[in-house]
Each structure stands twice: as structure tokens, then as C-alpha cells.
Image: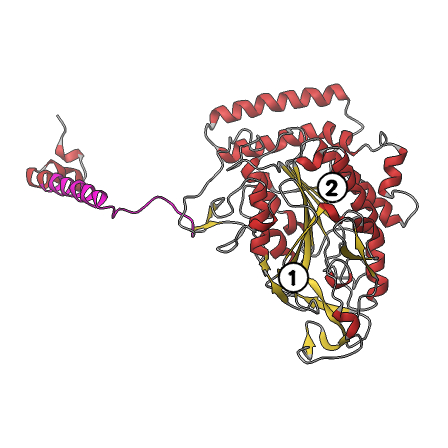
Amino acid sequence: MINPEHLSAQGRRLLDRRGFLGTAGLSTAGLALTSLLDADGLLASDTQTISGKPPLRPKIDPNNPYAARNPHFEMPAKQVLVIYCPGAVSHVDTFDYKPELWKLHGQKPPGIPAVTFEGPTGNIAKPFWEFKPRGETGKMVSELLPHLARQVDDFCFLHALTTDTSAHPQGENFMNTGFTMEGFPSFGAWVTYALGTENQELPAFVAINDPRGLARSGKNNFGNGFLPAAFQGTDFTAKNPPNNLRRPAEFSGEADRGTVQLLKRLNAKHLEMYPGDANLAGRIASYELAGRMQTSVPEVMDLSGETESTLKAYGVEGGSELRGHYARNCILARRLLEQGVRVVQLFNGSDPAGGNGITNWDSHSNIAETHAMQAEIMDQPTAALLADLKQRGLLEHTLVVWATEFGRMPFLQANGTGRDHNPSAFTCFLAGAGVKSGFSYGESDEFGFKTAVNETTVYDFNATILHLMGLHHERLTYYHNGLERRLTNVHGHVIEDVLA
């Protein structure tokens, strides 16, 4: 029998008959009230997103966070290649043909603002390169990008894109993470969080930086944000492999293998001590992937087996040194996709501090010189990469996204040689699995200044890319700081007209 003196005051109260009956009565009344509220549909509902739909969270095995997972619905695209051009490519000098610019060249018609992002404005300027009809579709593309121009019948252009910012770091963040602020997961992180990867020997998400370095927003462009760290991009280039990849010379292969086996046993015992610890399991999985990468990455980076004709097609030799390095990055991108890497992000442009067209597409002065320099680096290797993917059948299940953060103005700056930032109209294109080919969606106005038909936001753009990967952009969420966060925030609609 329990001695009441050994109990707390609350415990002794529960032994009191009146206290027991009162507690039991209240508990019964609470259960009855719950039952009545449930019958009337007044209980709190299951977790829902801002769209009123339940979230679709992937079921991730902590011991293998990179395991391939099924999409929300079947679509042709299983992998995605993002070709990102930091600095803002001028749409009116590349893919968005505007005859009015020739008619009004040198004039300043009403409606042109007196001041834009970097200061006073100048006059309307015709494109610095001639436009010609290309392919069977007759799409007008400028001479700045002659190699990509030959492939327009494979592209799906979006000509009425708009963005929320005219600053480069925020523009890169917005395009690649869906938010202008830092700290949010990148597109690649969301896709690998949802789908994992087929190849367990290589990272699910690889970012191939420009030969000149990181873009302005740095690793935020391919970071994991608040998603688990396993889903951030692994960055390396054809010239610079991941750090600490090679075994130190003082260790033999046998000693290295012995160390790996010992670590495997120790990790297994550690997991037995802490079953269900997802963070521990995820860290172990990351280290094990790093170990496997010691053999898989050097193999995929070895371009010695590429044919002379392939190297020539990509422009590895014969151009600038930077083009040669970027061309090798393009070959690396193809090899990674061949090995089943889920997301490859290829950068053409760098420099966190700017560079005014020298290290990226940001051409506030001397646009004829600076855009031409960037195009020489980007055009031939990129076109060869897309042609190679098509020839090898990879475009049947690979979505290609060519993007930049905003466009450039149809008028010059006061210096008379450069174009300022234009967030109100710019062009990107898609190609490959799931999208229409030889198609253009949306239009900018007669000057390429603002959108005119089928305005498309970055939210719509990202919603469509997720849809093409078989993912519901409204339901792919992650609970963070009291909110069901998603790539498209609370906005965005799938652009149905571009779907094949």
C-alpha cells in the first residue's frame, strides 16, 4: 500500500475521492466536446499550404538521403541542366527582335524615364548586332550568338519575364531561390530534396562555377538554405575538383581502405547507440558519399577519353583561354548528366564585386565590346552542349533552362555606350523534355522596355520548371519558422502554354 506521506501534494489530491471524481468528470466532458466538434467539422484541420492543399513532403531515409524518390506525377523530365548567365544578358541584343529600335535609333521618345538604376538615361539605341531569321521557324536572333541561333527550332522562349528587383545579388537570389533575401533554398536543393538522385556515387546536385569564380550571390545560388545540408549543391569545375579529394601521398591505398572499413564499423555502432537520430544518420551518409566521390569524381572529370571532334565542337581550342575552360565545364556538365546526376547548374559569369562586363554580362558601358567578349565564351560551348545532349538522346529526359536575372534597357545610359538594368522585360528559354520546341511565349512592348502580352513572373517560371520535373510547386514545402515554405512563396502559376 502506498504511504500518502511519500507523495507530492498533487499526488495526494488525486487520492482524494472528490478530486478524483472532479478530474474524471472534466476529462470525460473534454472527450465528449472533442467528439462533438469533430462531428461538426470544427476541429483544427490537417496541415495545409497557403493554397489550401496538404503539403507533399518526401519520405527521406536518414541513412540514405540521396536515394531516388518518385515525383508527384509523371513527366518526361528526370534531370535538369540550368545554364545561368549572371550580369543580365541584353534581350534586345540577342533573342527579342524589336524593329522599332531601328526606326527610333538616336531619339528619345516620350515615356522614357529620366533616370534608371545607374543614373540618367540616353537615347534609344538599335541592337549592336544584326538580326536574321533562323531555322525553319524563322525566329529572329542576332549575330551575337550565331551558334545558339542555329538551334532555335529546339528552344521554347519566354519573352515577357519580369522580376521584383533591379540589383544583381537580389536578382540572382530571386531567380535561383525564389526570394530576393539570402537564406532560402536554391532551386536545385528543392529538386534534390524532393527527388534524390539515381547515381549514389556522385552528388545529387552539382554546381559548375564559371572559370573566373563564383557569381555575385556566391554559394547562395546553389545553397540548401533551411533544407537539410545534404541537399546543397557540390561545386567544382573541370579545372578545380572538390577539396581534399585525393589521398595524401604518405597513405597507401591499403591503409586508406582499412581506415574506411574501420570508420564504417564505428559509424554503425554509433547509430546503434542513437537509433532514429536523423541528423547523425545524415552526416554519416554525407561522409560516406564523400568517400565514394574519391573515385567517382576523378573518373567523371577525366576528359582524356573525349574524341578530337568533340573537343573541337565544344571549342576547347582555338578561342580565348576562358572559352577553353568554359568549354571543358560544358563537357563536364554532359558527363555528369550521363551519370544520372539529378541537377547540374552551369554558370557563365562571375565576380561578387561586379566587373562591368569584364567578368559577367553586366554591360553599363562599352556593351559592344563586353557583350561580345562574354558571347565568345558562352555561345559555341553552350550550343555544342545542347547539340551533344540531343544527339545522345539525353534531351528526352533532361530539361534545359537558360536564364539570366533580368534584361537591359532599349535606350543607352548617359555615357552613350552601355545599357542599364531592366527588370520589367527580359528573355530566358527552355529546351528538352516536356516543353514545346520552336515556340515563343509572351511579348515585350515595341521597344523591349516592358512586358505587353502574357507577362510572366519569376514565380511562374519556377513553378513551370518544377511542374516539368513532376513536382507540385504549391505542395512541395518544408516547415520552417512556423510557415510552410516553398520555392514559389505564395505566388506562381504553371505556364500551361509552353508544355509539350
- Give, as a three-letter code, the residue at label 2: Phe
x and y, in percent, of residue 189 in the image: 59, 43
Mark 1 crowd level (few <14, some 14–19, many ≥20, 10 Å Cα): many
* Residue 29 magenta: yes
Q: Nearer the viewer, residue 261 or 9?
A: 261
Q: Which mark is residue 443?
A: 1
Which residue does the image show at 64% across and 20% down from the upper left?
261
Mark 2 crowd level (few <14, some 14–19, many ≥20, 10 Å Cα): some
Which residue does the image show at 47% across and 25% down from the upper left?
273
Task: Identify the residue under disc 2.
Answer: 236
Q: Which of 498 and 194 is in front in this view?
A: 498
x and y, in percent, of residue 137 in the image: 74, 51
Q: Is residue 40 above or below residue 15?
A: below
Q: How far apart are marks 1 and 2 (CA)?
A: 37 Å
Q: Is residue 427 above or below residue 185?
A: below
Q: Which mark is residue 363?
A: none
Q: What stretch is highlighted in magenta?
A: 22-50
Nearer the observer: mark 1 or 2; the answer is 1
**Kind of element beneath mark 2:** loop
Q: Is the magenta stretch mostly helix, strand or loop?
A: helix
